[in-house]
Image: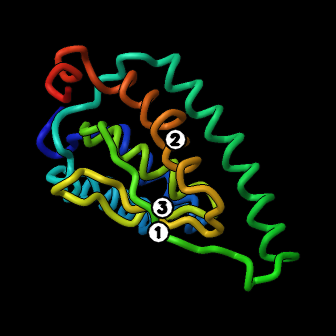
Amino acid sequence: MSTWLPYPVVSLGLCALWLLLNQRVDPGHLLLGALVGIAGPLLGRRLQPRGYPRLRAPAALVRLLAMATVEVLRSCFNVCRIILFADYAKVNSSFIRVPLTLRDPYGLALLSCLINLTPGTVWVEILPDSHELVLHVFDLQDERFWIDTIQQRYEQPLLDIFTTEADRADLA
């Protein structure tokens, strides 16, 4: 890792993305792509909370992503059905609070991505005092179902993936 290219793979990816978006490979676009590839990681370096994440259970990550894919597809059909065919007076859009144990910034970022990718749910914020996730649900029927789903299907695998036994002892 050098000073000018802290993340060379990301730099190469950004340059390639620039060229793909512009659909040209002339010298000007190559230069601009290289500048984007160098500047992006340099400017984003301070956003990195700490080194690279350590995946403690890669198999659990694969299972989590597979399960989340199924949930996203199922939720997509449910939200489409509600939008197209439901009586809007009966749609119960609401905010709920979900207590979280997960503290790892990478785990929280992945949890945020998984929640926001799922149609009908939006991560609003984490309350700093109580470490509760405020979640908006498009059609809330059972608040306890959502709390259990977030804690058991998403947070528990993320705890397995991103935390060590020492971290868990500190959380208890």
**Residue 11 visible within the image:** no
Query: Measuring 78% from the left and 76% from the top, which residue is drawn there?
Result: 83
- Badge 3 density bin: few <14, some 14–19, many ≥20, Cα 10 Å: many
Relative depth, front residue between 28 and 149: 149
Quarter holding the C terminus is: top left
* Comes first in the chain, label 1 or label 2: 1
Query: Measuring 80% from the left and 58% from the top, which residue is drawn there?
Result: 77
Query: Measuring 65% from the left and 68% from the top, which residue is drawn there?
Result: 139
Relative depth, front residue between 113 and 53: 113
Query: Measuring 18% from the left and 50% from the top, which residue is drawn there?
Result: 45
For label 2, the SS is helix
Quarter holding the N terminus is: top left
For label 1, the SS is strand
Residue 98 x %, y %: 40, 51
Residue 13 x %, y %: 44, 46
> For the residues marked 1 and 2, what is the alpha-carbon distance in whole angstroms?
15 Å
Mark 2 highlights which residue?
Answer: 148
Amino acid identity at mark 3:
Trp
Q: In which image quadrant can residue 141 be found?
A: bottom right
> For the residues marked 3 and 2, what is the alpha-carbon distance in whole angstroms?
42 Å
Relative depth, front residue between 84 and 32: 84
Mark 3 highlights which residue?
Answer: 18
Instruction: Residue at the far right: name it.
Output: 85
Amino acid identity at mark 2:
Asp
